[in-house]
Image (cartoon, coloured by chain):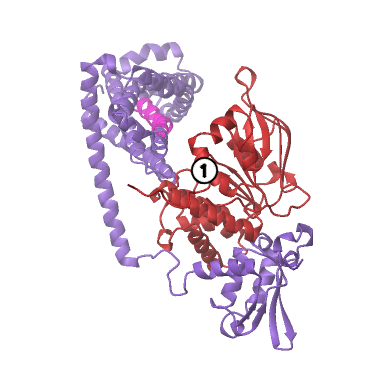
Amino acid sequence: MPSAMPALPVDAAPVVDIQGLWTVFGRGKSEVVIHRDLALQVRRGEVLTLVGGSGTGKTVLLRQMLGLEHPARGSVQVLGQPAAELGRHGASSRVGMLFQQGALFSAFSVLDNIAFALRELGTLPADVVTDAAYVKLQMVGLGPQHAHKRPSDLSGGMIKRVALARALIMDPPLLLLDEPTAGLDPHASDDFCDLLKDLHAELGLTVIMVTHDLDTLFALSTRVAVLASQKVLFTDTPRVVAGLDHPFIHDFFQGERGRRAMAPAPSQLPSTP
Amino acid sequence: MWQFCLNPRLVTEAALSPPSLEWRDTAQGRCAAPTGNWTAAALADRGVASQLLQALAPAGGGPIAALPWDLSGLQRLDHVGAQLLWRQWGMQWPAQLQVDALQRQMLERVARLTLPPGRPRTEPSADGTRSAIDHLGVRVLKGLGHARDYVRMQGQLLLDFIQLLRAPRDAPWRDLSGHLYQMGATAMPITALVGFLIGVVLAYLMALQLRQFGAEAFIVNILGISLIRELGPLLAAILVAGRSGSAITAQIGVMRVTEELDAMRVMGIAHGFRLVMPRALGLAIAMPLISVWTTLASLAGGMLASDLALKVTPAFFMQALPAAVEASNLALATGKSVVFGILIALVGCHYGLGVKPNTESLGQGTTASVVTSITVVILVDALFAILFKDVGI
């Protein structure tokens, strides 16, 4: 299996700085607290994986970083600004988000989806924008023949790839990925890991991802943050976290799949009798 | 240390300078040296982008590629920046190029993945006349398809209704009661308001004409016949078509987009029996009630206005109304409303089930549903007027 990425030298200021975050849904009796006094810092060049059971608020935490949810208390700073101020003009040059379901614009073709943010800027000639979109389309492993399809004509895996290409169109320094490899076949997942590694090295990307795919987790993450009991319980390198004693971590990492993902790949297939 | 200097990531945000293209004279001759931050983020600024594009524009193509290029002055380079360089080089590698490993990797990827100039980049579009004829044909076929589906849906509704009568216990009564409330009860305020105002307008308008002939008492006949027989049911139907017809299409359309319809089919639950029939039945029951309600509101408005404008007292109005309007008009209005209700529900369901899983189609379906249901209501009303011209007048 591929080894984890080397940690990059880091800047002083964290890319994402979350302090004392409370996320609360509903009011009064139906109030549900998702995050209670949660703290998390992500430094430049890190690949941080958020893990946690279903409903522990991993996606909500990503949405907080994007400014799509409002903190009930506490602060979320992204790239040195409050997250709520991210969604201004040219936001896609700062943050790229891969939504779980892709969230492609269904009225546009694949190419227009990818080119959208760059085209909206209106500062570059149309042919440069088109060429850049074609490059991104092929970077995620789709051929140019798919460029004029509609999102409704794509398979689940293709939607993921197009959504990734769209998130990457402006090579943003911060990339948020929600279940990037769910629904991809193993080969495509490996391609995805390789692509992300290359981009990480070339552009110095900071990546925060939610994934349940242990292969991706061990292949990419420089750090793993475990969400449980409404806060970030542990953050450390994947190997250290995998060895911690906590019921969730035990189930997550030390099941059969976890052992397989952590074990070095067998040098040779056992010979069949 | 050498690695450190070349690593573009280590330039801090504050030290970044805007992208530019400089020409340097060296011992070997002129040399192109792009400097600064060649990234999409920097090019997001209109001034910066236009300045750089202007610097690039006169160069483009052949002779430039022959010059030596030195990229060591670049602070950052991303795919968009690399794209600009590659385009500047006329999509071929310059004869002499000084780059570091990461820049080369980026440029190589862009070089590999940029489509060669001959490849069509935009969607092919058909030529004028032929595509116009094609388009017309497609529209005609689409129209026929709609008509066929609509007839099929009416047949299915009949079958579902028979099934309902045979096994009333299995019917979706809970859905029906929900629809009755949503489409009927919640429509009462708006229909009452519109009905009342139409009654007032009509009475004032007629008052001016009738006073000229001294035929004030006939206001009761005019208002009674027109409101009870025609305007009450029609107004109610148009309002409900706009209100509930669109809601039906949007609900079912969103179910298509989110694959809920497919999930229902997989569970063996028929769309006709579970989605179409309760809505059609709901509107068939609610529509006549709403129609009566609207008629009453408009009569109240008319009564008030005739009292004010013509001094026709409400007592006289009430007394004269039964004589002016035969009871068969009420039956006609109610029957008409039942038909309107079923038609509106079926049109709404038809367009809702026809939505394709994308937002554009959902919008088109909802628009088409409202336009069609209002048109159908008016057409059928005209048909009723002709068929029953001897009844009740």
Residue A249 in picture, x, y percent from top left: 59, 32
Q: Amino acid at mark 1?
A: Ala
Q: Mainly helix, strand or loop, the magenta region? A: helix
Q: Depth check: B127 or A201 in front? A: A201
Q: Is residue B301 left or right of residue B226?
A: right
Q: Give the labeled residue for mark 1.
A: A261
Q: Is residue B58 left or right of residue A257?
A: right
Q: Quadrant of residue B169?
A: top left
Magenta range: B230-248
Is residue B358 part of the magenta span, yes or no? no
Relative to residue B308, is residue B133 depicted above or below? below
Hue of chain B?
purple
Q: Is residue B209 left or right of residue B43?
A: left
Question: Which quadrant does the C terminus of chain B fall into?
Answer: top left
Q: Is residue B328 left or right of residue B179?
A: left
Is residue B234 part of the magenta span, yes or no? yes
Indicate the chain on which mark 1 is placed: A
Q: Quadrant of residue A117?
A: bottom right
State whether residue B368 appears in this view. yes
Under circle 1, the secondary element is: helix
Residue B35 in picture, x, y percent from top left: 72, 71
Residue B29 in picture, x, y percent from top left: 70, 88
Q: Residue at x 73, y 82 (%)?
A: B24
Q: Quadrant of residue B285?
A: top left
Hue of chain A?
red
